[in-house]
Every structure is written in C-alpha cells, then in structure tokens.
Image (cartoon, grey):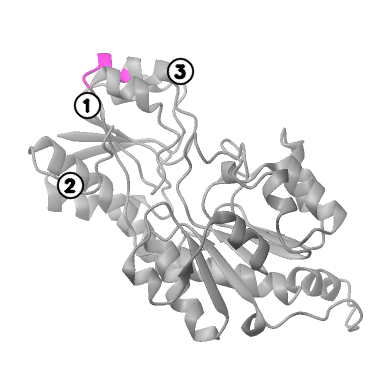
Amino acid sequence: MKIMFYALRPFDEQAYCDPYSKQYGIDYAYTAEVPTPDNLELAKGCDAVSTNPCLITPEYLEAWAAMGVKFLPCRSIGYDHIPQQKAKELGMRISHSWYPPAGVADYAIMLMLMCNRKVGQILRRADAQDYSLSGKMGRDITRMTVGVIGTGNIGRTVLRHLSGFGCKLLAYDLYPNDEARQYAEYVDLDTLYKSCDIITLHTNATAANRHMIDANAIAKMKNGVVLINTARGTLIDPEALINGLESGKIGAAGLDVVENENGLFYFNHMGDALQNRELAMLRSFPNVIFTPHTAFYTDVNVASMVESAFKAVRAMADGEQTPLEVRL
C-alpha cells in the first residue's frame, strides 16, 4: 500500500508521516505542490491520493483512477473540493480527517471576542502610535445572545465553552442532539437570525447551504450583528456581506474562510494582484478581522489530519468500517 500526498507541507505535516507510515504499514511519497496536469503522474504506483482543500477536477480523478488509485483521503474535515459524483462513478472512495474540535471552537470564540472589543482597529492604530480611546469602546459578550449554526463536534464545543461566559445561547441544526441542548435552545433559522447579537457558522458546505447567509438572511438579523465564519467560505454570499458591512447592518465580521480561497490561502502572494475582489474589499473594512484559514492550525490537529489519511486508507483497504469514510 502506498499514498501519494499532494500539497504536503514539509515544515509541519511531513514530520508526522514517517511514524504513521510505520504504524499503519503504508508507504508514502509526497510533493509540496498542489495537483496539476503536469504532476498527476506522481501518483503512479500508489493506491491512494491525499490532498487538502485545493482544486481537484473530474479529469484529475479519471487520470488517477487509470493509474489504479482507489482511495482519496482528504487531510481536512471538509471534502467539498473533491468531485464526489465523479469519484462515485469511478469507484473511488473518499475519506476525511478528524481532529479534536477545541482548536477551531476556541478560535471562533477568539474572533467573537476580538470583534466585540474592536481588537483589529486597536492593533492597527497602535501600530501608528495612536493610543487614544475614541472609537475603541467594545461590548461585553456576557450580555449577548450567541447563535451557533451547526452543532456537530465543533459547534457543540463552541456551545460548551461559551456556556462559561454567561451569554444566552441559541442553536440551529437539521439534526439536533441532546448534548447541545444542555447549553443552548434549538430554534429555527429565522428566530436565530432575529434574536442573536453574534452568529457563528459551524456546518459543512453543501450545494443546499451555499450562500445560506445571503441578503435575505442578513435583512432578518439584528442591526450591528457580528458574523463569525471558521467553517467554509461558500456559506456566506460575499456581495451580501460587503453590502451589510457598508450599510452598518453588520457591525463586525470575523472571517477565517472566504469564497474562492483555493489557490490563495497557504501560498505567499506578497506583491501579487489577487484575483479575488471580494477578499480585497473585506480586508479594507476596519471592523473585519480576517485570517487565512488557520483556525485548525495547531500541532495536535496537524498530526491528527496526517494520521487520518493513513488510518482511513488502512481501514478501507482491509475492508473495515471507518467513520472517516464519506458515504457517497
């Protein structure tokens, strides 16, 4: 058994490959490059191809399938970058990663606190030696109502950790669960939109929920609402978000993900004119805190994502059930 790792980071991920390769009895090869038509041949002789979120086309899958690749273990919780229908047609099995939810959950809470306390503006002005107080007054999260959309592992952890702040908690999920009910009241989306001072997203990206936060949804929200997204950029319509920020309907946004981020994030584009106008606009707002998809980035999580690729391939190849496999 052998896995071809694309976009493997030699400064962090690669250190975990050797021990997990030995533990699971699976060989590996790697490149720091994302898949392109010019490097698809690197997967020859491999049973699996592992990627993190990047551009994967149906043609890439056809080429790999012709080489004998059977498994597509993603080094990310999300797997929406994989053309799932084409993978199903080719009989290729997809898996995703698991990692402890606390890292992303606490990062989302950090963004809430930073937005409420105007930390982005405070730091920018401090860089210019402006230490005045005018325009820097924040709000106390303890007195707020926070809405969590998506109560999977990360969303439930957000609720559990937020419960210590004393704020009122509301939640929405297609599949409510009892653990979340210990901390929050489940409500419908319209009720959540109109009731919450802060709304944080923790749901997978699907065709059905693309741009779930659109102009119509934003119009139902409280004036000055704070939006937090550490999940997937496609959940928010960027034009509606920009309009909401310009009008003041949205008081602040903490964004770790944006739409059309593939090819931008995790690369050094210093000095480049980026082909993402929405990102340029969002970065211009003093009440937007933007980070380039780093909420997951802890030592524990990186190790877990690398292990998940080996673990899933070992289980699927041995005919064992694994919760890491995506059921197509």
Q: Residue at x 31, y 54 (%)?
A: 98
| Distance (Cα) linking label 2 and label 3 | 31 Å
The disc, 1 or 3, on the residue closer to the chain's N-terminal end is 3
For marks 2 and 3 on the same chain, the one whose residue lies earlier in the sequence: 3
CB contact under 8 Å: marks 2 and 1:
no
The secondary element bearing badge 2 is classed as loop
The amino acid sitting under disc 3 is: Pro
Question: Which part of the image, by quadrant, shows the N terminus?
Answer: top left
Is residue 258 inside the magenta stretch? no
Q: Residues within 10 Å of mark 1 (few under 14, many from 20)?
A: many
Q: Position of residue 306 (x, y in %)?
A: 31, 50
Residue indicated by mark 3: 37
Please report the residue visible at 39 percent of the width from the left and 35 percent of the height from the top.
6
Q: How many marks?
A: 3
Q: Residue 322: which numbered mark, if any?
A: 2
Q: Secondary structure at mark 1?
A: loop
